[in-house]
Amino acid sequence: MKRYLLPLLVFVVMAGFLAIGLKLDPREVPSPLIGKPAPAFDLPQLATPDQRLAAKDLRGQVWLLNVWASWCVACRQEHPLLVELSKSGQVKLYGLNYKDKREDALRWLANFGDPYLKSISDTDGLVGIDYGVYGVPETFVIDKQGVIRHKQIGPVTAESLRDTLLPLVAKLEQTP
């Protein structure tokens, strides 16, 4: 009898871990970067590669960094919403074109609209790694001091924009 007790106990514990894991939402993976300074970058701009944009250039403003790619199907889902958001002027939106060919990215923006104040090119994905990007699209809310305050994994939806992103941006805009 004792011989079967240990395997049974191990099975029950493993089944418990499985049950807990199945209830988790993979889009709510906590980022260790929340509350920490956004990783520094200095990358060429997508439209004008002879000009660069650095994270330090964006200090003093609240902004969104949207990680996207022309090969990303989910990016196409969120893109019309981002175009509308940019027209509203509610927040400054910058793009990080991730592991993409410049020509493909420019063609994609020409076809679907360019919501970004500026888009930078992370061809080899190193800045994406620094930001802990799991896959595109991902969107970060960054405050005036350059600290990451929120990470949205997956496409931005009308609900996430209304319930999370824009209220957080409004709150951060009020802080000195």
Image (cartoon, rainbow, N blue to C red):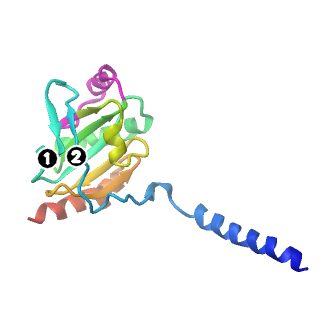
Q: Sequence-wise, which precedes: disc 2 or disc 1? A: 2
Residue 105's spot in the image, x, y percent? 31, 26
Please give the residue where the numbered disc 2 appears in the rendered image.
40
| Quadrant hosting residue 44 | top left
Residue 149's spot in the image, x, y percent? 26, 60
Question: In terms of depth relative to the viewer, which is nearer, 164 or 55?
Answer: 55
State the separation of the CA atoms marked 2 and 1: 7 Å
Which SS class for mark 1?
helix
Q: Is residue 122 left or right of residue 116?
A: right
Q: Residue furthest right?
A: 1
The residue drawn where x is 23% and y is 28% is 46
Q: Is residue 44 left or right of residue 97?
A: left
The residue drawn where x is 40% and y is 41% is 136
| Residue 56 numbered mark, or none | 1
Query: Can you say whether 131 is above or below 143 in the image?
Result: above
| Quadrant hosting residue 35 | bottom left
The residue drawn where x is 36% and y is 53% is 152
Q: Which residues, given as a range, are shown in magenta?
A: 100-119
Question: In terms of depth relative to the viewer, which is nearer, 113 or 172?
Answer: 172
Q: Is residue 42 left or right of residue 140?
A: left
Which amino acid, by three-letter code, is at mark 2? Answer: Ala
Q: Residues within 10 Å of mark 1 (few under 14, many from 20)?
A: some
Residue 104 among those drawn in magenta: yes
Residue 89's spot in the image, x, y percent? 14, 46
Which amino acid, by three-letter code, is at mark 1? Answer: Lys
Contact between labelled residues 1 and 2, with CB atoms less than 8 Å apart: yes
Q: Residue furthest front?
A: 3
Residue 61 among those drawn in magenta: no
